[in-house]
Amino acid sequence: MASGFNPNPQQSTLSGANLCYPDRQVCQGFALGNVTLREFNRTDISSQQVSFTVTAEGQAPMARIYVYVDNVSMGAVEGPFASGVPRLVALGVPTTIDVTPGVNYSVIVEGVFGGSSGTASADYWQSVSVVAVGG
């Protein structure tokens, strides 16, 4: 399981991004599954997490992904993401986003193929709408 935390998330407008909505069409590049946005409440600590599986669908592995919740960057997860192999990703959501169970949030994932050793990269975007749950 890959995990990470971006302590200084940056606002991102994502304007002009070619977003693919999995419920409306077949997406190129990668598939998302089991997208969950969860708030964990313990007696002494509260935390928030976004998790999902990502499966690269190209012939080459995917180099990295970038994850956004309501257009706020959660950071990058480095690959490689092997083609056809689902990989679980879990990222901490900073408290600058107030995750409230029952509220709808936008989770956007950008997948990047190539881009190393001077090769051209291909970027694919997917957006899913997720209702947060408590845990």
Image (cartoon, grey):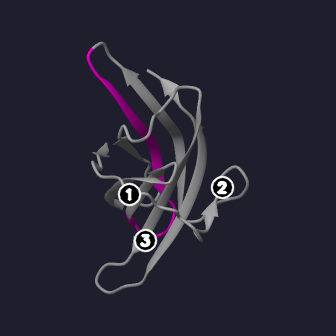
- Who comes first in sequence, dot 2 or dot 3? 2
Q: Which residues are magenta?
A: 44-63
**Where residue 39 sits in the image (x, y, percent)?**
43, 27
Q: Residue at x 59, y 65 (%)?
A: 28
Report the residue marked by disc 3: 113
Q: Amino acid at mark 3?
A: Phe
Q: CA distance from mark 2 to mark 1?
A: 24 Å
Q: Residue furthest bottom?
A: 118
- Who comes first in sequence, dot 1 or dot 3? 1
Q: Residue furthest top?
A: 43
Report the residue marked by disc 1: 10
- Up the image or down, 119 lies above or below 20; here it is below
Mark 2 or mark 3, which is nearer to you?
A: 2
**Where residue 76 sits in the image (x, y, percent)?**
34, 57
- Who comes first in sequence, dot 2 or dot 1? 1
Q: Residue at x 37, y 85 (%)?
A: 119
Report the residue marked by disc 2: 21
Q: CA distance from mark 2 to mark 3?
A: 19 Å
* Figure quadrant of the C terminus: top left
Q: Amino acid at mark 2?
A: Tyr
Neighbours of disc 3 within 10 Å: few (<14), some (14-19), many (20+): many
Q: Amino acid at mark 1?
A: Gln
